[in-house]
Image (cartoon, rainbow, N blue to C red):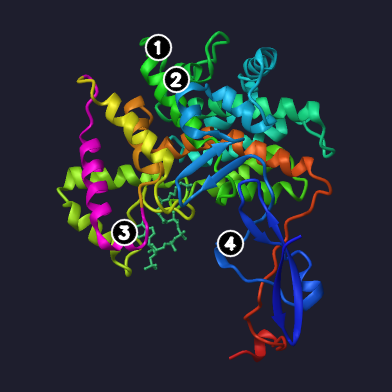
Amino acid sequence: MEKAELIYGGKTIGLPVVTGTEGEKAIDISRLRQESGLITLDVGYQNTGSCMSEITFIDGDRGILRYRGIPIEELAERASFSEVAYLLIYGDLPNRAEQAVFSQYLTQNSMIHEEMLRFFDGFPPTAHPMAILATMVNAMSVYYTDYYTEDFQAQTFDLMAASLISRIRTIAAYSYKHSIGQPHIYPKPDLKYTANFLYMMFDSPVDPYVPDPDIEKVLSTLLILHADHEQNCSTSTVRLVGSSMANLYASICSGICALWGPLHGGANQKVIDMLENIDRNGISIEECLASAKDKNSRVRLFGFGHRVYKSHDPRARILKQCAKTIFRNSDRRDSLVNIAIELEEAALKDEFFIERKLYPNIDFYSGILFRMIGIPTNMFTVMFAIGRLPGMIAQWKEMHDATPLKIGRPRQIYTGSTLRHYIPLEERP
Ligand code: CMC
């Protein structure tokens, strides 16, 4: 086996080098502390692999993304979201019998417990949909207790996975209906995954939902592109929480909370806020870029930059093309598309962004498409969560399938006070 050598304190320590199937290499430091007394320090995990995984491959320099070996471009064009979910979770595309069983599980688990509706009544109409989503997903562990045991079992896992994938869509649609003061719409068993979601979102007793195959296709593409992205902030949170043997619902809930932040899944909402700001308040592209470059402000060019992609984000390319195609139709106009294209072109010519290899990421064009579908801006990150769910579940399963299950527990370098003693309140100045 290949080894790397570390010389420290006059001693040479040999560290095994692990190679992945695509030739990626890592130094295995799992015995470093025992052998040298050292730990590694890598704030933000920029160079730290937390696991070995067979699910998703990314080559950030070449802009490659594959789920279980299949290029994202092929899946976005040809697969359905439920097929992709199956592929990620179970490792292969389903055959017809497997697809039928999986679809049946999704249909049978699409309604939420009627008592859960009372939760919606308790939320103010202004509640952020991500807060509602996280609460309701965690609340599933109260209502579907027979679906999980602390011993990880295949049959119960299959039910839990289908329950989450199917019900998250119902929860999201109900929270929207609640926010606009309309009655919720029950799922329809004969509709496919994306069509059913659109139906629950947009049907009403006085204005029936009219299916639109173009919109269903765009939504399916969006969900597929979000479905997994290896070890990112939210997925790694799911793994970390799940490593304590917390149940799947609780683990996914924590991942949803991690996704909410504007540097991660919340960026899609910020992109539209930014584009609307340019549109409404007449801010110039130059001003917008200048504030993103200003180190004294916390403003960033949302939808730009990525920890891994350093040439392009293949998901952003697919979505840009998708936006261009769909908006060619004269019935569908959105002034924000042209602003986005102008902003992207200006940023790609700007030295600041070139030097730092900052390109549009998935969130740059996804918001424009969510808007076209009719999804309100504050629900964009919920849509990201619906899409990302199969990946989170797949990563949780992969970790649990591996033996032994190792609890996640990083170390730190302490930089606080050295020993000092307690002073009673009356003696303090
Ligand atoms: N606008 C302006 N400057 C940026 C941006 C941006 N969008 N992204 C990175 N930079 C600068 C940053 O200030 C830093 O500059 P310097 O070297 O002078 O200090 C340099 O580029 C490196 O940035 P970083 O924050 O150290 O890079 P990171 O790998 O830690 O962060 C990121 C990656 C995605 C958080 C970051 O690029 C960012 O904040 N982008 C905007 C938010 C966004 O679009 N997030 C969605 C990411 S894709 C969906 C997902 O998977 O979450």
Determine crowd level at label 2: few under 14, some 14-19, many 20+ residues with C-alpha closer than 10 A: many
Q: Earlier in the sequence, mark 3 or mark 4?
A: 4
Determine crowd level at label 4: few under 14, some 14-19, many 20+ residues with C-alpha closer than 10 A: few
Seen in the picture, residue 64 relative to 116 is either above or below; the reply is: below
Q: Are marks 3 and 4 in contact (CB under 8 Å)?
A: no
Mark 2 to mark 1 CA distance (whole Å): 8 Å
Some atom of ligand 1 lies within 8 Å of the CB belonging to the residue at label 3:
yes
Residues in magenta, as a range: 331-358
SS of the residue under disc 2: helix
The residue under the point 34% across, 57% down is 300
SS of the residue under disc 1: loop
Mark 4 to mark 1 CA distance (whole Å): 44 Å
Label 1 sits on residue = 211
Q: Is residue 136 visible?
A: no
Which image quadrant for residue 294?
Answer: bottom left
Q: Nearest the camera: 8 or 286?
A: 8
Label 4 sits on residue = 45
Label 2 sits on residue = 198
Return the x and y of residue 101 as percentages of the image width and height. Answer: 69, 15
Mark 1 or mark 3, whichever is nearer to me: 3
Q: Is residue 344 magenta?
A: yes
Q: Amino acid at mark 4?
A: Tyr
* Residue furthest to the front: 1
Determine crowd level at label 1: few under 14, some 14-19, many 20+ residues with C-alpha closer than 10 A: some
Some atom of ligand 1 lies within 8 Å of the CB belonging to the residue at label 1:
no
The residue under the point 72% across, 88% down is 421
